Each structure stands twice: as structure tokens, then as C-alpha cells.
């Protein structure tokens, strides 16, 4: 049984006061919700105050990125150990916005992933095709390359802990969600890739979540599909009300 996993990516939004209000509201609105793992990913400057506010709560905290070295002369970077020190148990790696605007490649994703899991963080590994790649029929080829390259050198026990986020780039922040069928097809394909790289047992255990304009009105349909184990939510995670509604799988 895979426990559903819902993460909110706050991207570059919120001041400390906004963030603390959001988590206070989120805790109130999700009180008593069980059987789902919930994570929020605030920007670096908010991690300490948000993780303090969520201590002893069922909601975990993620960084939105990390560097692969533990320390050194890498101005502006944050290491996995620093994320743990700030109260994080998770980290998003390879988000398409990092790939698109900040030069992230499969190779840097792989280095970050290995460093994060070695430091004991749960990595949320983002993969997904662009619109052009989907339209030219390359979706599966792209997913195969991203999954293979990103997971190279990861051990089986480490792999079981990783959460894969299938995020078709054309669906992120666009209001255009993949259909339940499109998402299920991609997730089943990704699970097959994980089975081939590691084992069918690892593939059965690993959570594969969908990301791309998830909101209260489309989560239930997505979650009804066998290979969709949760969601990585951007825009709809910024307001506690809509994120709580996604968590509660309300329509
Ligand atoms: C994301 O940031 O990972 C994301 C899926 O954003 P949105 O839900 O806004 O499309």
C-alpha cells in the first residue's frame, strides 16, 4: 500500500507573516485528516520559521532545491545538510522551472539527488516533457532519459524513498491539466521504468505523484487512477483553503 503524498510548492511567494498565517490555517483546515502525507515547500528564507510552526504536526517541510556539495565556496547555494538543519525532511529536485530558467540538467539533477538522499532527505524528483516534446511524440523517450539519468547510481533502499513527480511542463501554472488518462499512462510508464532499473518491488513501493494545475476540482479524478499516488501542487497550495481542499480530495 502506497500512502498518498501531497506536496505544496510555494515557489518564490510569501513573506514570513504570510507563510505563518498559511500554515496556521492549513493546520486548522486539515485537522483530523489521516492517511495522507503532506509537505510544504517554502522558499529558503522561510524554512526555519515554517518548520518551527509545524514542529510536532503531521505536515513536513521541503526545500525547493539544494546543491550537491555539503559545504564550500559556492555563493548562493544551500546544501542538503543545511536544509536538514533548517527543519526540512524533504527536498524538491529538478523542478522544470529550475531546468528552464537556471540551467538544471539531468546530470546536475542526478548529483543533487544522490547528495540529498545520502544526507537522509526524501527527494521529490520532478520529470516531465515539454509541449513540443509531447506534440512530436517524444514523451516516453524524454521520460525514459530523465528517469534513467536522474536515478543513475542511486541504491535500491534509497530509490524506495524517492517520490517521483510527473509534471508535464505544458501543464505547470497554465491551468491546463493533463487528463486523468494522460497522467495515468505516463505514471504507469514511469513505474515500469523504475521496475526495470531497480525491481518490481521497488516500483510497487515508490510513490509517483502528478503535478500540473492540480486544484480541488480535478484531484479526485487523478487520485482515482491506480498509478497516481498524490500531487505536487503549485498555485493551489498558496492558499490554505484550496490546498486543504486538495488534501481532503474535495471536488
Ligand atoms: C509546480 O510548481 O510544481 C506546479 C505543478 O505548479 P501548478 O500547480 O501551479 O501548475
Image (cartoon, rainbow, N blue to C red):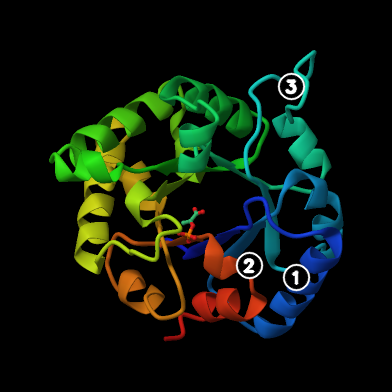
Q: CA distance from mark 1 to mark 2?
A: 10 Å
Instruction: Report crowding for label 2: few under 14, some 14 to 19, many 20 or more residues within 10 A (C-alpha).
Output: many
Residue projecting furthest to the left: 137
Label 1 crowd bin: few (<14), some (14–19), many (20+), radius 10 Å? many
Q: Position of residue 97 (x, y in %)?
A: 50, 41
The first of marks 3 and 1 along the sequence is: 1
Element type at mark 1: helix
The reply to whether residue 192 is visible in this rendering is no
Label 3 – label 1 distance at C-alpha: 29 Å
Q: Residue at x 31, y 76 (%)?
A: 221
Q: Are marks 1 and 2 in contact (CB under 8 Å)?
A: no
> Mark 2 or 3, which is nearer the eye?
2
232 vs 70: above or below? below
Residue 238, which numbered label?
Answer: 2
The circle drawn on residue 70 is 3
In the picture of the structure, the residue carrying the numbered disc 1 is 23
Amino acid at each position: 500500500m502506497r500512502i498518498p503524498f501531497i506536496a505544496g510548492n510555494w515557489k518564490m511567494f510569501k513573506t514570513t507573516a504570510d507563510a505563518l498565517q498559511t500554515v496556521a490555517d492549513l493546520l486548522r483546515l486539515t485537522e483530523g485528516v489521516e492517511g495522507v502525507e503532506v509537505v510544504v515547500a517554502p522558499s529558503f528564507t522561510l524554512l526555519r520559521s515554517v518548520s518551527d510552526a509545524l514542529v510536532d504536526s503531521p505536515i513536513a517541510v521541503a526545500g525547493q532545491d539544494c546543491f550537491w556539495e555539503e559545504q564550500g565556496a559556492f555563493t548562493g547555494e544551500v546544501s542538503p545538510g543545511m536544509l536538514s538543519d533548517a527543519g526540512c525532511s524533504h527536498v524538491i529536485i529538478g523542478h522544470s522551472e529550475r531546468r528552464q530558467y537556471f540551467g538544471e540538467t539531468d546530470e546536475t539533477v542526478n548529483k543533487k539527488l544522490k547528495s540529498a538522499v545520502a544526507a537522509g532527505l526524501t527527494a521529490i524528483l520532478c520529470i516531465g516533457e515539454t509541449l513540443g516534446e509531447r506534440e512530436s511524440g517524444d514523451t516516453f523517450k524524454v521520460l525514459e532519459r530523465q528517469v534513467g539519468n536522474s536515478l543513475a547510481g542511486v541504491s535500491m533502499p534509497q530509490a524506495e524513498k524517492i517520490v517521483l513527480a510527473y509534471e508535464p511542463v505544458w501543464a505547470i501554472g497554465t491551468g491546463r491539466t493533463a487528463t486523468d488518462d494522460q497522467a495515468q499512462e505516463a505514471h504507469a510508464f514511469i513505474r515500469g521504468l523504475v521496475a526495470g532499473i531497480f525491481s518490481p518491488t521497488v516500483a510497487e513501493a515508490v510513490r509517483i505523484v502528478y503535478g500540473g494545475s492540480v486544484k480541488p476540482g480535478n484531484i479526485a479524478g487523478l487520485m482515482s487512477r491506480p498509478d497516481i499516488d498524490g500531487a505536487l501542487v503549485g498555485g493551489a497550495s498558496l492558499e490554505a483553503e484550496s490546498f486543504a481542499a486538495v488534501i481532503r480530495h474535495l471536488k
